[in-house]
């Protein structure tokens, strides 16, 4: 929905109407908690607790787009820096 990262080209990336997500059947792979908590830091603790509860219940799971052997950690970092990884990547020993 937005090109660029944060303040480097997509200043309105976190201001998309949520109804578009539902109407288009999109999947949200990540959302910045910083936007709301900068204005009200008291929101962070309860929101984080709720997310962790959902993870423990199996209602949420991280999106892993790539897996690398530990020996290839430089390739993994390079892929993250170049924006080739959506979500997270895992290094396996």
Image (spheres, rainbow, N blue to C red):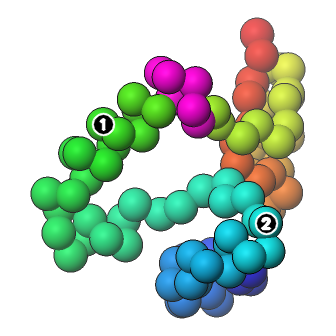
Left/right of residue 88 with respect to residue 40 in the rendered view:
right
Mark 2, residue position = 25
Q: Nearer the viewer, mark 1 or mark 2?
A: 2
Mark 1, residue position = 49
Residues in magenta, as a range: 55-60
Q: Secondary structure at mark 1?
A: helix
Q: Quadrant of residue 77?
A: top right
Left/right of residue 6 with respect to residue 70 in the rendered view:
left
* Mark positioned earlier in the residue sequence (1 or 2): 2
* Residue 23 horizontal/vertical position (percent): 74, 76
Q: Residue at x 23, y 45 (%)?
A: 46
Out of 23 and 3, give the one closest to the viewer: 23
Out of 61 and 21, give the one closest to the viewer: 21
Task: Please say if 59 is above or below 20.
Answer: above
Residue 66 disc label: none
Q: Is residue 83 visible?
A: yes
- Position of the C terminus by quadrant: top right
């Amino acid at each position: 929905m937005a090109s660029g990262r944060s303040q480097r080209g997509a200043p309105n990336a976190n201001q998309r109407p949520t109804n578009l997500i539902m109407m288009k059947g999109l999947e949200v792979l990540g959302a910045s908690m910083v936007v709301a908590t900068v204005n009200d830091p008291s929101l962070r603790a309860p929101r984080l607790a709720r997310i962790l509860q959902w993870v423990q219940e199996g209602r949420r799971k991280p999106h892993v787009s790539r897996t690398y052997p530990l020996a290839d950690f430089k390739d993994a970092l390079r892929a993250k820096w170049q924006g080739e990884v959506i979500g997270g990547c895992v290094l396996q020993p």
